[in-house]
Image (cartoon, rainbow, N blue to C red):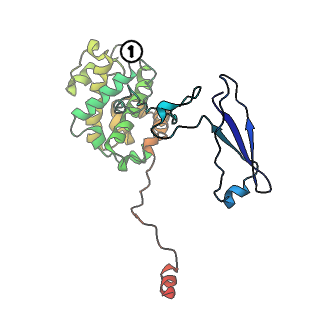
Amino acid sequence: MHGATLVARWTLGGSLALFAGLAAVAEPPVPLRSVPVLSAPVLPAARSALALPLRITIGPARPPPGTADRASPGETVSPVLSPATPPVVAQRGAPLRPVARGPWRPPALWDPLPEGRDWTQTALEAMAETSPGLPDLLPADIGDWCPGYPRASKAWRAAFWIATISALARRESNHDPQAVGGGGAWHGLLQIAPATARGHGCEADTPAELADGRANLACAVRIMTHAVARDGVVAAGGGGLAADWGPMSREAPREAIRQWVRDQPYCEVQTAVATALRPLARPGAASIRLAAR
């Protein structure tokens, strides 16, 4: 066999007991060399360990330096293998940066529709092309519609108008860009009359052009901006949006639109963030430090 196995076990009395275990026989037995006596003092920590086995494997004795060529017959001298260090595996194929998010789009009532995202984007672009745009205006009755609007960012102000337009479009056309009302007088998502479109300089000013959802929305944003800037209100007193859209002039549909918009998170009043970088000292802390001196 390549070697015998000695098992050392600390006993409860503090002495060291050695006993031999036989390994599986694979070759003719080789005489064991002398085993050095463990003369190191027993540490208190080791003495306190109860029945902890210590396994010592003794193989054929290594020849003295320079006598490797004179090994006894049957003896083999093998190098001691150190535990292999697991290789460091680098992750491959992972992106160096997270994927950038797309532009934020405020929620709207037409979101479930396939065209909803395009309609929102069109309305946002129409607001940005007008100066001042709807988000730049501060209507006198805005507190009834969106309490957080005065202190909101421009993006959140735009979100208020997107919500209002999408809610009004549901009342006017049920989000059908091909809708025609008033005996053929009003057309599209926001039911705009061709004469009204021409009066505000809209690019879409025919029934066929106003039947395109994006063109209709761009024209509606233009009309709304003129009305709110002129009257200084969202819909109070029959002004603002109420001057051109019937649902805004009638109490029941106007209140339904207002309540839904008002409940959106961007219409909540945002509390101020504390500017102190260090917590306030506890009462009496200064007097305690002085007394300690």
Residue 55 place in picture, x, y as percent: 67, 41
The image shows a total of numbered marks equal to: 1
| Quadrant of res 30 | top right
Residue closer to the observer: 158 or 8: 8
- Looking at the picture, does residue 9 appear above or below residue 209? below
Which three-letter amino acid code belongs to the residue tagged 1? Ala
Q: Is residue 186 left or right of residue 57?
A: left
| Quadrant of res 57 | top right
Q: Residue at x 52, y 83 (%)?
A: 288
As drawn, the residue found furthest toward the right would be 13
Q: Secondary structure at mark 1?
A: loop
Q: Residue at x 68, y 55 (%)?
A: 46
Residue 51 place in picture, x, y as percent: 76, 48
Please indicate, yes or no, whether residue 85 appears anywhere in the rendered image.
no
Q: Label 1: how many residues lie within 10 Å, few (<14), some (14-19) or many (20+)?
A: some
- Looking at the picture, does residue 37 appear above or below residue 277? above
Query: Quarter holding the N terminus?
Result: top right
- Looking at the picture, does residue 62 appear above or below residue 193? below
Please indicate, yes or no, whether residue 94 appears anywhere in the rendered image.
yes
Residue closer to the observer: 61 or 144: 61
Residue 159 place in picture, x, y as percent: 37, 36
Residue under numbered circle 1: 179
| Quadrant of res 208 | top left
Residue closer to the observer: 43 or 1: 1
Residue 24 place in picture, x, y as percent: 70, 25
Residue closer to the observer: 184 or 35: 35
